[in-house]
Image (cartoon, helix red, strand yellow):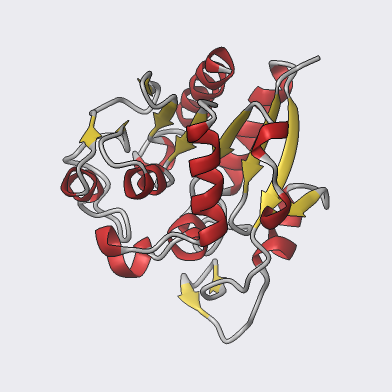
Amino acid sequence: MGKKVAIILAGCGVYDGSEVHESSAVMVHLSREGAQVEFYAPDIDQMHVVHHIKGQPTEEKRNVLAESARIARGNVKDLAMMKAKELDALIIPGGFGVAKNLCTWAVDGKNCTVSKHVEDTIKAFHSAKKPIGLCCISPVLAAKILPGCEVTVGHDTECQTWPYAKTAEALEDLGCTHVNKEVSEVHVDVKNKLVTTSAFMCNAPVHEIYDGIGKMVREVLKLA
């Protein structure tokens, strides 16, 4: 029986939800490794809905759980229902939805607040010494919740697109250690069982992002 891994989604679409390619890469690599996957998302309204061609917010309202079902092919549960004791690991793909719907990083940066259910989930896995995989902007969640942890979002001289500008510096300000890594690499914080990789935080071809996420998935499963 493969490891049971929870994936937290934040909607559907890079500008207002989970990054679709990152989410898909996580799913494919977990499948290849024989893991069982359970999808979760908070049952809340999105911060806003972005027109993905224009890159501008609209007046439309959408629900994070319902939008996440687009990626999970309908098989997604309310995050409030998650029981960490029944799972072996947790992975959170990136996308602006992490910084908008799972926390307020997009607006408040290092002074952000994290959704209660997201914070409770990360703390539950951490206290149970179960591994957590984070890519793209999602390492900010660990940095905010687990002071002193080690993460990567790529390089501290890159990622100058809002809300990613100066992310590495902000993580250091939160008391964490940022480790510079290439897109194809991961950083493993053995003490905290955190595995992070930069994904679309770096300007790289999608196949390199896919490969980096694959390394993250494999390291998470090793720690599980």
In the rendered image of this protein, does residue 94 appear above or below residue 15?
A: above
What is the quadrant of the N terminus in the image? Answer: top right
Question: Residue 11: horizontal and vertical position, in percent?
Answer: 62, 59
In which quadrant of the rendered image does the C terminus lie?
top right
Residue appearing at x 70%, y 42% in the figure: 83
Residue 221, picture quadrant: top right
Compared with 7, 221 (above or below) is: above
Q: Residue 34's x, y, as percent? A: 75, 17
Give left or right: position of 50 versus 110: right
Residue 165 figure quarter: bottom left
Q: Is residue 159 left or right of residue 116?
A: left
Question: In this orientation, does residue 13 appear?
Answer: yes
Q: Is residue 206 visible?
A: no
Asked if residue 197 is positioned above or below residue 82 in the image, the reply reads above
Q: State the residue lying farthest toward the bottom.
A: 59
Residue drawn at point x = 27 percent, y = 47 percent: 159
Front in this rendered view, residue 64 or 214: 64
Residue 81 rendering spot, x and y as whole percentages: 73, 52
Q: In the image, residue 92 lies at what x, y percent?
A: 54, 42
24 to 43, vertically: above or below: above
